[in-house]
Image (cartoon, rainbow, N blue to C red):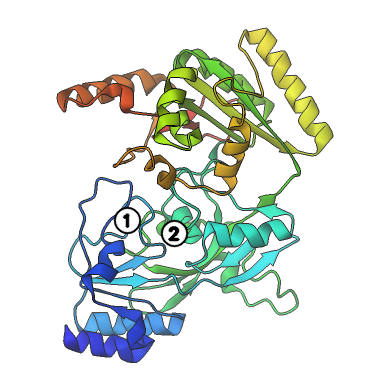
Amino acid sequence: MDILHQQLSAIVGKDFVLTDPDALEIYGGDNISFIPHRLPLLAVKPGSVEEIQAVLKVASLNRTPIIPSSSPGCGHGASIPSVPGLTLDLGRLNRIHLIDDVYRNAVIEPGVTFSQLQQSAKEKGFRVLCPLELPDSSSIVSTYAEMSPLYSWPRYGTESILTMEVLMPNGELLKTGMAAIPVIDRPYFPFGTTPSYFNKVWFGSQGTLGIMTKASIKLKTDYETKQVLFIPADSFEQVLPAIKEIKRLDSPLEIFIADAVYLSGLLADSSEAFLTLKERLPSKTVVMVLRAEKEKVAYQKADLQDLAEKMGFILTDCLEADTNAAKKILDEIEQPEGYMRFKKHKNAYAVIPFICMARQIPVFNRVIGQIAQQFQYDFKNIGSLLLPVEPTRGSFPVFVLL
């Protein structure tokens, strides 16, 4: 252990090698998964690709497992050690190399957070696609690579990484897609806009098959006109036909269905407000966000109103239980507090994400209810959110249930 510490200190400096249990605590848990808390042997914080390569070599010589971590304390437990090893904290690799005004993408390192890039992107008239559940202090690259649900999935699909640069386990640097092609006459276009499907090798497996050191990710236009609309309902099944038709219109850029418990956690500023909202909000609420030029948003809203009259559902831009709900939802979508907001109301908070077809929702609800009863947990305290993740217009939605 002392030899390993000395070798790593010689690479990154002693200030960037952590061994104190209190300092390592952030790498051992504080997440929204059910993965058991476990500390690494030590953590090292490299500041360059070359330092990472040197750390990989030292770890290999000492036969020490490596666990990459881009944003400690955030996520679904992917960076919690399964065995004692060395946590490779990539937080110092936080450069924004490029924001491409023409092709609407950004080239970033794994330590770049949503809050960091969102600020820079908005200065140029763009916005970053943000996740459910995770705070804006999370790493964009690791969030996208781990396929954590994004509010934008219903419209833009599940892949937000275009191309990438990856360090293989032997220290070799691999570039995918157009990132591998030297471009001299167009330096603002080094990573390309066409996804390389080779990227999928690392989706959900970053750290197992390689360490991402740079990625080109999608940005979207930040329109000034934004309209949040709601559809109150008594059950998920009641609004599924409406969701299918709304997706045919291809209007909302964000759309999800939340029950009263989940939506209360999203809107409440205190535990007292959470309990009040839980009783006053509709049993289920469809939340939609329109973003476009002012005239386009106006006719999109009119189309939705016509659909509401035809199908017999209520469309409103305000919730009686919280008249400021629209602003709070926009803030959460663009600058998420994630699970930190929910943990204000309860001492513990965890997420069980899964994907199913819409017709399977009642089955999963029954299963969750039976499990809650088995462990004597009040089913009324379990909130759920449904996200239609199938972006194809007119297709029957597939859902992620949290």
Q: Which mark is residue 97?
A: none
Q: Could you tell me if residue 194 is visible in this image?
A: no
Q: Are marks 1 and 2 in contact (CB under 8 Å)?
A: yes
State which tag comes first along the sequence, 1 or 2.
Answer: 1
Q: Quadrant of the N terminus?
A: bottom left
Q: Reply above or below: 94 against 268.
A: below
Q: Is residue 122 left or right of residue 374?
A: right
Q: Which mark is residue 142?
A: 2
Which percent across, then down, holds residue 26? Answer: 31, 62
Spatial CA distance of label 1 from label 2 is 10 Å
Q: Residue at x 15, y 24 (%)?
A: 374
Label 2 secondary element: helix
Q: Which residue bears the numbered disc 1? A: 78
User: Pointer 2: residues within 10 angstroms few (<14), some, or many (20+)?
Assistant: many
User: In the orientation shown, which residue stands out farthest toward the right?
Assistant: 295
User: Pointer 1: residues within 10 angstroms few (<14), some, or many (20+)?
Assistant: many
Which percent across, then down, holds residue 282? Answer: 49, 17
**Snapshot quadrant of residue 317:** top right
Q: Could you tell me if residue 211 is visible in this image?
A: yes
Q: Reply above or below: 111 against 281.
A: below
**Snapshot quadrant of residue 224:** top right
Q: Residue at x 61, y 57 (%)?
A: 118
Q: Residue at x 71, y 75 (%)?
A: 187
Q: Amino acid at mark 1?
A: Ala
Which percent across, then down, holds residue 321? Answer: 54, 22
Label 1 secondary element: loop
Q: Is residue 4 left or right of residue 249?
A: left
Q: Amino acid at mark 2?
A: Ser
Q: Is residue 264 left or right of residue 152?
A: left
